[in-house]
Amino acid sequence: MVGLKAISLLFPLSFPQIRDLAPPISTATLLSFAALGASYHILAPQYSTQKQLSWILTTVSSAVMTIMSLPFMYDYFMHGGRVQYIRTLSTFSIAAVRFFQGYLAADLTIGTVYYRDQLSTLTGWIHHLVYILVVELAVRRSWTHIFCLAAIMEVCQ
């Protein structure tokens, strides 16, 4: 009991509040994690270096996110570049961003095993963990359609 009291003094948030800050693991995230893991293991035998292996998931994710961004880009251009007229397509956009969360988790997990040298602290771990939280914020604020609109930038990967 003394240990919990000390923790609560160090961290003023109550345990239920801390639990509420943790992103929920959705079915779409788990499915994308599994699908990306399978994709990696199917494609990996074709490549030999850790650098090549590290780009497999990034390439698959970039392709998927680019395709998922197309309906939002269509709305954006059809309405003269005005973001307020982009349809939210909430089920679709939430599935898209949850896919992206699955990619971020899969890249860290698979990367730790198969291409550890390519996962730096800043551009790997910190970048991916921050993006998991950014995506969660987009979900909780109902901004997933804006995130999907920005996903067209994945084509530059």
Image (cartoon, rainbow, N blue to C red):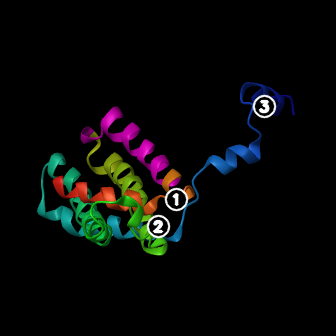
At x 26%, y 58%, the residue is: 57
Q: Is residue 79 left or right of residue 144?
A: left
- Category of crowding for the residue at label 2, using alpha-carbon neighbours closer than 10 angstroms: few (below 14), some (14–19), many (at least 20): many
Q: Which residues are magenta?
A: 117-136
Q: Quadrant of residue 17?
A: top right
Q: Would you place residue 106 above or below residue 129 in this image?
A: below
The residue depicted at 68 percent of the width and 49 percent of the height is: 19
Instruction: Judge from the rendering whether residue 145 lies leftward or rightward of residue 61; answer left or right.
Output: right
Q: Residues within 10 Å of mark 3 (few under 14, many from 20)?
A: few
Q: Residue under circle 1?
A: 139
Question: CA separation, marks 1 and 2?
Answer: 7 Å
Q: Which residue is mark 2?
A: 94
Q: Separation of disc 3 and disc 2 at Cα?
A: 34 Å
Q: Position of residue 55 (x, y in %)?
A: 20, 53
Marks 3 and 1: in contact by CB < 8 Å? no
Lower position in the chain sequence, tag 1 or tag 2? 2
Instruction: Report the residue that reaches farthest toward the front.
Output: 80
Disc 3: which residue: 8
- Asked if the magenta segment contains residue 130, the reply would be yes
Q: Which mark is residue 147?
A: none
> Which residue in the rendered view is the most extreme toward the right?
1
Q: Verify whether residue 101 appears in magenta.
A: no
The amino acid sitting under disc 2 is Ile
